[in-house]
Amino acid sequence: QVQLVESGGGLVQAGGSLTLSCSVSGSIVRINMMAWYRQAPGKQRELVAVISSGSTNYANSAKGRFTISRDNVKNTGYLRMNSLKPEDTAVYYCNADVIQQGFIRGRNYWGQGTQVTVSS
């Protein structure tokens, strides 16, 4: 069984920074892709950033302010968020495509989410 656990959320003032972490545990062979999504109250979940095979992509709202990275040894992903705005307030979810031992193809997993609140 694979588990994703996010941490690092919290309350921050506008202009501040936070770093989210996503720890992936279980019988992992390889993590193909890691991504961060967010969901604000009353809105659909949206992709924030994704990292796969060293390449990264960002939502327009995140470009220039957020940085996604991963540590393949620790099986941990990160989202560094700078210059935070009140509109960044949301629950942030980690998503990963993971190949487990005994399997050839990856399966997609979600974390439980971590709340990020940006005050004006």
Image (cartoon, rainbow, N blue to C red):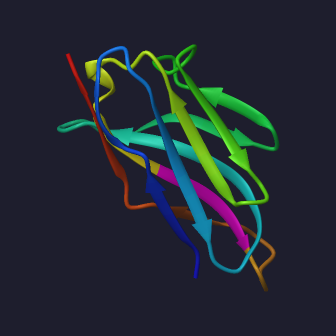
Q: Is residue 20 above or below residue 73?
A: above
Q: Position of residue 1 (x, y in %)?
A: 58, 82
Magenta-span inclusion, residue 96: yes
Between 25 and 8, the residue placed more toward the observer is 8
- Residue shown at the point (82%, 44%) measured from the top left: 53
Drawn side of residue 103 relative to residue 82, left or right? right
* Image quarter of the C terminus: top left
Between 9 and 1, the residue placed more toward the observer is 9
Q: Is residue 108 above or below residue 115?
A: below
Q: Position of residue 34 (x, y in %)?
A: 63, 49
| The quarter of the displayed image where residue 11 is located | top left
Drawn side of residue 29 relative to residue 107, left or right? right
Prevailing secondary structure of the magenta residues = strand
- Residue shown at the point (53%, 49%) measured from the top left: 21
Q: Is residue 118 above or below residue 108?
A: above
What's the magenta region? 94-99
